[in-house]
Image: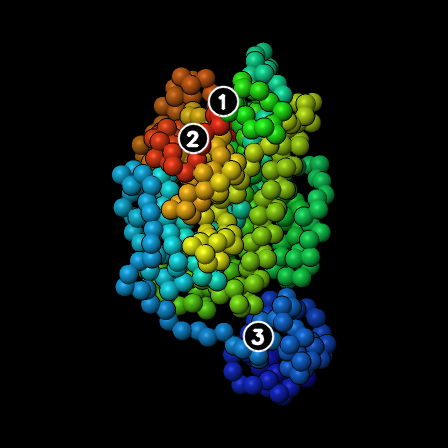
Amino acid sequence: MGNKLSGKDLIKLGFPKNNSINIALGQINRYRKREKKESILTEAKDVLLHPEKYEGNGTWGKVAEGLIKPVQVRMHQLKATRVPFKIFGENEIDQQAKFQLYDSLKLPISVAGALMPDAHSGYGLPIGGVLATDNAVIPYGVGVDIGCRMSLSIFDLPASHFKGKEHQLEAILKDNTKFGMYETHASRVDHDVFYKSEFQDIPLLKNLLPKAYKQLGSSGGGNHFVEFGIAKIENPENEWKLEKGEYFAVLSHSGSRGLGANIAKHYTYLATKQCPLPKNVQHLAWLDLNTHDGQEYWLAMNLAGEYAKACHDDIHRRIAKAIGKRVVVTIENHHNFAWKEMVNGQECIVHRKGATPAAEGQLGIIPGSMTAPGYIVKGKGNAESLNSASHGAGRLFSRAKCKSNFTQSEIKKVLKANEVTLIGGNIDEAPMAYKDIRKVMANQSDLVEVLGTFTPKIVRMDR
């Protein structure tokens, strides 16, 4: 008997000569290749005899599914007509983003859609796209940075706390934030999220646990940031221990780091294999939630969302400790996520790729740019937007166009004119790269009520 497991070994056990053998070999090579062949064959025999016992199992669940009820792989075509949809701020949105939404509305699984006023083109769904589907999740409808989110901490400190403390606050940001692929904190902390069963039950996640632990409390590159600013509260909520006025605050924007990126890559690949689509819409491949991979992605996606929140919580904890003051109010929200929600009386999977949940009474923060205010909002629960709002101002210029259109000296002038200090940052995140947030907010007045604003003063980004 050779050391390497082969299809012939599985056929000898009695496995049917179909795709279940390929699935088994793929799972074993990915997750169990260092184990002894004899022990794997013993387990494989039990899977063959009692597949129902292994449904949902990290290694053998997909094999069991192939034995009980194999996933049907067949080419899907787009429908001739679109499902109902609504575009907010249509005149401010590029045509490509609209066409991407139109394609998604013709998927056989689509129920309803919407496009937010900050929308621009992306992969799969456009950024700012919202899509409700029937019992199916689109990994690229969620996005690569799963659970990317905003988190605003307001301190019971007046806005005047900035005066005379600029250099001290810059040092706090430099010392307590880490950005990009390689920066991590020297002093690491534990967190409840690492003890979630998914990190042990799903082999992919188990392999990613060390990276997730290492990257806790760090932020990504690109448009991710941590910034000090002034929160101006105009309509305080009853439960807030704040009166109308201006307060010292910190806002962060980041996601699930390498954990989310690897989950997105893995399950997008599986979706494209299981759900062939015409080439122009192949990024919209979905996973049926009645399948092993669909259920596993759903668990992994939700874990990535919890991990993204844990990262923000750690960032804000470190900063609050350095400042020596307690946070009074925290306002936070995901984008790049999918939720189970009711749409027209039907339970659907609502994807918000770069869109803020805005159900009635739901709080959120919608940033502008580093020189434009963000808005503290409360959702109005507009059914036409699928209870959603924009996740920011949205890009006016692509990253490539920023590099050809703007210079560092121009950016410095704009920052100086707005009394903003920038630590790090690249030309592709120039303030001029973004749409006018005031126009965006005017185009979604039916979606959210404004409770206040956040004006950046000291901004930290990746270099």
Q: In terms of sequence position, does the residue under pointer 2 or pointer 3 come before the other?
A: 3
Residue 282's spot in the image, x, y percent?
38, 61
Residue 76's spot in the image, x, y percent?
37, 69
36 in relation to 302, above or below: below
Give the residue pinned by disc 2. 368
Camera-nearest residue between 404 and 429: 429
Q: In terms of sequence position, does the residue under pointer 1 or pointer 3 come before the other?
A: 3
Alpha carbon separation for disc pair 2 and 1 = 18 Å
Mark 1 touches mark 3? (CB < 8 Å): no
Residue 68's spot in the image, x, y percent?
57, 79
Q: For the residue marked with disc 1, what is the amino acid?
A: Glu
Quarter containing the N terminus: bottom right
Camera-nearest residue between 89 and 424: 89
At mark 3, the secondary structure is: helix
At mark 1, the secondary structure is: loop
Residue 96 vs residue 328: left or right? left
At mark 2, the secondary structure is: loop
Give the residue pinned by disc 3. 65
Mark 2 touches mark 3? (CB < 8 Å): no
Camera-nearest residue between 432 and 438: 438
Front label number (1 vs 3): 1
Q: Residue at x 33, y 60 (%)?
A: 106
Give the residue pinned by disc 1. 234
**Badge 1: few (under 14), some or many (20 or more) residues near its Cα, within 10 Å?**
some
Q: Residue at x 59, y 35 (%)?
A: 178
Residue 443 vs residue 14: left or right? left
Q: For the residue marked with disc 3, what is the amino acid?
A: Glu
Alpha carbon separation for disc pair 1 and 3 = 55 Å
Alpha carbon separation for disc pair 2 and 3 = 47 Å
Residue 77 seen in the current view? yes
Residue 45 vs residue 74: left or right? right
**Badge 3: few (under 14), some or many (20 or more) residues near its Cα, within 10 Å?**
many
